[in-house]
Image (cartoon, coloured by chain):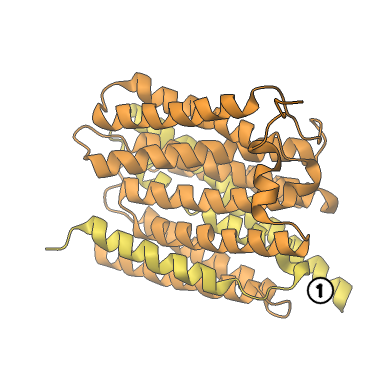
């Protein structure tokens, strides 16, 4: 049975790859989406057949509630509000990877697993808050202007340093939950800080990049829970997302670093 | 015996190259649906969440798994449906 599940994952991965390929041309795009979604269905069914599962109650409730919310929102959302809806969905995916990372913490985990757990929390967390900010800016629930303040660069530097420090401390001492929570909080803060200095007009590019991140978060979570399909599908989305981001930048006549660091890197010019 | 991490890293490396190759010369009108479709795939994390929510290593892990299943399901179902709606509109416009 276990082997059968693994082979089902192989087929699911092939369907994702084929689906993505078809999504790239107008004539086949809709069929491509269907193929990709059937791959997802197959992967979920295979996961449900896992012999280790003792209790289906939580899974079923979670899937029904989540699926119903997703279906309702997807059907009712205005056509013009699509990009921010994608950002919102993407943020939920990132949060899910963060939670999977946290739930994967088990006594006696080795340093490699702990590192991938930290990565899935970090990338998942910043994807979540970053996507929420992108959603807010596009739907104009918050100001779409680039937000900058004095010493922004220094604050960002401190957050990054704090993430690295607390990540290393946690991997070396997994019983100290303090460091784990510091990683979670700082990752969430980092997502906000990374997106607020970028103006609303550049948000589609940012969403594409965050989409790539949520793939990487799923990939890291896959390492944390030892699951091939998470690694394959996650890295596919991660890599194709980066390329798509670059293509979108080119179409807008901007460079990727220009979009990302126009606000984030420079902060408010201290000299003026 | 080659350690499992090495195999997994191999898989990671190959699928990154594949991801790069797949997205090539995509027309600008398809950027948003493609992004949305790829986003739905990133909801694959639901598979990891299912295992955690069902095995019940601890109460905490099970609850974390439960919320992860719910959030990832929003991502998967919403992502695919939104992509389909976008692409359906395209067809009308072009046809």
Residue depicted at x 39% and y 69%: B14
Tell me where residue A195 sits by quadrant.
Answer: top right
Q: Residue drawn 72% across and 80% down?
A: A27
Q: Chain B is drawn in which colour?
A: yellow
**Residue A67 appears in view:** no
| Residue B60 location (% of width, % of height) | 36, 27
Q: Is the C terminus of chain B in the top left, top right, bottom left or bottom right quadrant?
A: bottom right
Q: Which residue of the protein is positioned furthest toward the left in this rendering?
A: B1
Task: Name the residue beneath numbered marker 1.
Answer: B91
- The residue under the point 53% across, 69% down is B20
Residue A106, compared with residue B75, is above or below; it is above
- Reply above or below: A77 against B62: below
Q: Would you say residue B24 is visible in this rendering? A: yes
Determine whether the residue tagged by mark 1 lies in a helix, strand or loop: helix
Q: Could you tell me residue B25's position as x and y percent? A: 67, 76
Q: Which residue: 32% across, 60% down?
A: B9
Answer with the quarter of the image where residue A2 lies: bottom left
* Foreground of the two, B74 or A270: A270
């Amino acid at each position: 049975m276990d082997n059968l599940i693994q082979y089902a994952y192989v087929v699911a991965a092939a369907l994702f790859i084929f689906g993505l390929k078809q999504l790239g041309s107008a004539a086949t795009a809709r069929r491509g989406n269907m193929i990709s979604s059937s791959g997802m269905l197959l992967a979920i069914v295979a996961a449900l057949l896992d012999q280790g599962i003792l209790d289906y109650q939580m899974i079923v409730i979670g899937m029904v509630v989540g699926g119903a919310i997703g279906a309702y929102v997807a059907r009712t959302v205005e056509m013009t509000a699509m990009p921010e809806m994608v950002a919102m969905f993407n943020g939920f995916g990132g949060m899910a990877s963060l939670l999977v990372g946290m739930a994967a913490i088990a006594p006696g985990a080795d340093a490699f697993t702990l590192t991938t757990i930290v990565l899935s929390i970090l990338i998942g967390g910043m994807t979540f808050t970053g996507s929420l900010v992108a959603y807010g800016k596009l739907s104009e629930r918050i100001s779409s202007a680039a937000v900058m303040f004095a010493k922004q660069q220094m604050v960002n530097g401190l957050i990054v340093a704090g993430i690295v420090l607390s990540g290393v401390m946690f991997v070396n001492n997994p019983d100290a939950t303090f460091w784990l929570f510091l990683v979670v909080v700082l990752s969430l803060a980092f997502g906000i800080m990374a997106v607020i200095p970028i103006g609303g007009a550049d948000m589609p590019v940012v969403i594409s990049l965050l989409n790539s991140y949520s793939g990487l978060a799923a990939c890291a979570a896959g390492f944390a829970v030892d699951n091939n399909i998470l690694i394959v599908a996650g890295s596919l989305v991660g890599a194709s997302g980066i390329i798509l981001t670059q293509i979108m930048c080119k179409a807008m006549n901007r460079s990727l670093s220009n979009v990302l660091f126009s606000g984030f890197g420079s902060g408010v010019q201290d000299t003026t | 015996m080659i350690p499992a991490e090495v195999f997994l890293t191999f898989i990671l490396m190959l699928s990154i190259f594949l991801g790069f190759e797949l997205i090539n010369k995509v027309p600008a009108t398809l950027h948003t649906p493609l992004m949305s479709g790829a986003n739905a795939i990133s909801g694959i994390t639901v598979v990891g969440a299912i295992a955690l929510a069902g095995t019940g290593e601890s109460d905490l892990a099970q609850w974390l798994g439960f919320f992860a299943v719910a959030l990832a399901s929003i991502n998967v179902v919403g992502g695919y449906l939104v992509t389909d709606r976008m692409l359906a509109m395209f067809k009308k416009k072009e046809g």
